[in-house]
Amino acid sequence: MSMGEARSGDGIDPDFGSFGSDFDRIDDVLEGDNGPAKLLVEAKTTVVDDFIYSEVLKDVAPKVISSLEETLERPVSDEEMVDAIKHGGEHGDGEFYERILNLAIEADNSGDTHAIQNSIFEDKVEVSDAFAIDYILRGGKRLRPFMTLLAEFGLEGETSYKGAMVGASQEIVHASSLEHDDDMDDDVVRRGKLTSERVNKALYGEGSWKQSVLDGNKVEAWGNEAINSIIDDPSESFDGIPKQASKLIFQMEADLNDGQKRDIDMEDMQLGEASLEDYEEMIAGKTGALFKSGVDIILEDHLRDSDYLQDEREEIRGLFNEYMTSFNRLFQSGDDAIEVFRPEESGKSETDVANRKITFPAIQTKDHLQQERDEYAELLLDVFDGAYDEVTSEMQSTAEEMHQEAMQKDEVREEVFEDPEDMDLTISDDAEAGGEWEEEWITNAIRMYGKEASEAVADSYLGTAFSAVDELYEMDVINDAAREKYKQMAEFVWNRDH
């Protein structure tokens, strides 16, 4: 049994403990000890790190360095500069990094070979590849491989190299989905460093998204390589996963892309058109496919050597599916809830409301108001969807009534926001349609009217998840330790603050 103590940086709640040695195995794969990936890591090392640590930075970016020194009001050491650029650091917000890349390219294009000796931009494809592999090496919460290892621990009583390899494949494919996501959203920073899309924008200019799409596809292929390396091979004594189970990773990739397409489709919806069913269908692909694939592979590997009857096998598959469906919904719903209900704790950028993204709390707020007070729901939809031309006295009156009613409720006053009194829903006399007040108003409305409704639906998800693992335990499929861990993980992903 390879159960280990929690390690800082794993991203798993320390109270759970962590599969320490198995995460070391995953690190070995991601760091390049597994054949083809090694060359890519070497490219990352020779191209990216040499550039970052090089004195070229001070040659190409004196104005940027000077600006940083002015901000700090003192000279900047090489260590501070590297920390800011490579790891995010105190001033590494991504734009600093991007500016240096742009300056480097400007110098290269102008023929200033002294500024960039042995330019890293001689092979742009190699640079793009290097930053693509860097996505994988940036770490993360590791919740996907954790759930895979937990499934193996619950079914087999121990974890293995095989389970770690499945987890590594999930992490790699997850990185590819992040690259595609950043490309579509034009994001600047991912895990404290510049996104590969912004690197490609600096390298290629117009049309950089084409390279970014290909980068994401290439990373996805590396994930398949990790799975292919542990398929049963009659010529070897290695006990791998059955070929049929390995096909689940390809189904996951198809489902993942389907979920992303549905997410894009929801971006074009108005809140008034969206339903919880739409949201859950999107989750099944975008979030659910990645989590569920690893668990399914481990389950199929376990069932092939088991004595279960066919009906029992189907029941076991059904119970695992019930748990993972609920878990995936809790994970994505919890992710949405962090920004609006726990922003002070998370450190996440608050963009969902600003972008009018249809989230779990937004849907729950709308549904709750439609059930309780239609006029409140109408005002929310008008403001959220921009379905009004001017602020009327009726809107102002309804907003004032909403505010007075909400502030009388105990659950609002008991919330852990900095000051509930600041959650104002009144609309001033000089407010205009599309004004700056809208974003704060929507946020306050969701906090005041959506939290209880969100928690009620999350409780139903938890109930389904708990019931499924209880039945698996009663069937003697998983042990008691695994049952409790499954319950803890379901609660954690809903209540987490990061």
Image (cartoon, helix red, strand yellow):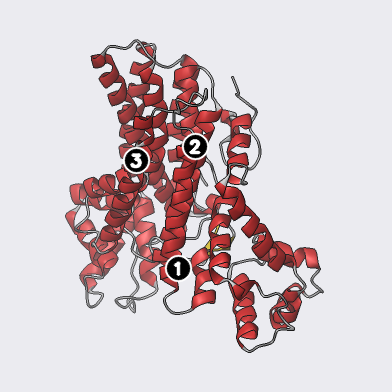
Label 3 vs label 1, nearer the camera? 1
Inter-mark Cα distance, 3 to 1? 32 Å
| Numbered circle sitting on residue 229 | 2
Quadrant in which the N terminus appears: top right
The residue depicted at 34 percent of the width and 10 percent of the height is: 307
Q: Give, as a three-letter code, the residue at label 3.
A: Arg
Which residue carries the number 1 mark? 211
Q: In screen coordinates, is 74 left or right of 179? A: right
Label 3 vs 1, first from the N-terminus: 1
Residue at 54% x, 20% y is 158
Residue 230 vertical position relative to residue 212 in the rendered view, above or below: above
Report the Cα–Cα distance between label 2 and label 3: 31 Å
Q: Are marks 3 and 1 in contact (CB under 8 Å)?
A: no
The tag earlier along the polypeptide, 2 or 1, is 1
Which of labels 2 and 1 is toward the front? 2
Q: Is residue 131 left or right of residue 244?
A: right
Q: Callout 2: helix, strand or loop?
A: loop
Find residue 38 and report its horizontal and vertical position in percent: 61, 49
Q: Amino acid at mark 2?
A: Ser
Q: Which residue is mark 3?
A: 329
Q: Counting other residues with Cα less than 10 Å from the Cα at mark 3, is it few (<14), some (14-19), or many (20 or more)? A: many
| In the foreground, 449 or 156 | 156
Amino acid, disc 1: Gln
| Residue extending farthest bottom | 110
Depth order, front residue of 296/29: 29
Residue 347 or 468: which is nearer the viewer? Answer: 468
